[in-house]
Image (cartoon, rainbow, N blue to C red):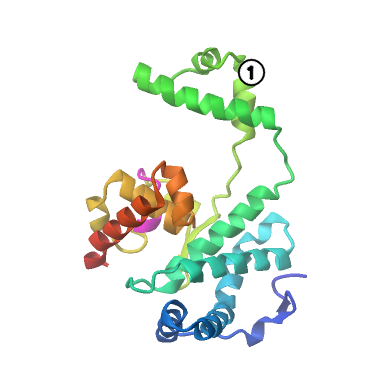
Amino acid sequence: MQYNKVEICGINTADLKVLDDNKQKELMHVVKNGTPEQSKNAREILIKGNLRLVLSVVQKFTNRGENPDDLFQVGCIGLIKAIDNFDDTLDVKFSTYGVPMIIGEVRRYLRDSNYIRVSRSIRDTAYKAMQAKEKLQNELLREPTIEEIADEISQTRENVIIALEAIVEPVSLYEPVFSDGGDTVYVMDQISDSTGESGWIDELSIKDSIQKLSDRERKILSLRFYSGKTQTETAKCMGISQAQVSRIEKCAINKIRPYT
């Protein structure tokens, strides 16, 4: 089945409905504040009303050789997660939050289903090498050499090189990073961005206000809204509690809100 056909996963794409922003907000409010039955019905309408959004995202991954039906279903999982985690009290379009969530879910699926398997021992060596590199950087106040890293973890230079190269996933310059309203940001658009993690935030027209955020605030927003992680997953990445993530996230958004 190809994307240019009308049907995907048994759904006629020509029949897919699109919800306007006001309807999205209305339904999202019901999902969060309605009775269980009202919430369930509103959630179903939101899912069906955003399937075209899922389709537009997964179409950008057609060069991976994956079954389009599988990608569409994975994208729907990302959509459902976005609906369940979206904060309707924020002045943010649902698509702005939903697109990165869908992209994140698809990318995780592609990563986990990669046919090129790396052995556990090589991965362990790579992770030890990365930890050693960070430790040596702090001690030496410079970039350590491969030989120094190898000595630190009692491995040969060749083993360290092989391990580090094995866990690097090639990324296309045309990999979609963010999309909203038909304007897509690709990896190639971010190459000159020295801040890396804040590139997608800059695309949300908050270049001035982002400077007011601390490194930790930017990191948390990046994990939450670009990588599509839940607050619990973000807490594990940051080594703090979920309550702290929630507090820092809200504080960061409040700093940005006046400028958006």
The residue shown at (39%, 69%) is 87
In the image, the segment drawn in magenta is 194-201
Residue 150 relative to residue 138: left or right: right
**Quarter-wise, where is residue 40 in the image?**
bottom right
Outermost residue to the right: 1
The residue shown at (74%, 62%) is 67
Quadrant holding the N terminus: bottom right
The residue indicated by pointer 1 is 158
Q: How many marks?
A: 1
Residue 3 relative to residue 145: left or right: right
Q: Position of residue 244 (x, y in %)?
A: 34, 51
Q: Is residue 220 above or below residue 22?
A: above
**Quarter-wise, where is residue 21 in the image?**
bottom left
Q: Position of residue 130 (x, y in %)?
A: 51, 28
Residue 26 relative to residue 109: left or right: left
Task: Give the residue type at disc 1.
Answer: Glu
The residue shown at (57%, 81%) is 44
Q: Is residue 106 above or below residue 190?
A: below
Residue 232 relative to residue 116: left or right: left
Query: SS at mark 1?
Result: helix
- Residue 22 shown in magenta: no
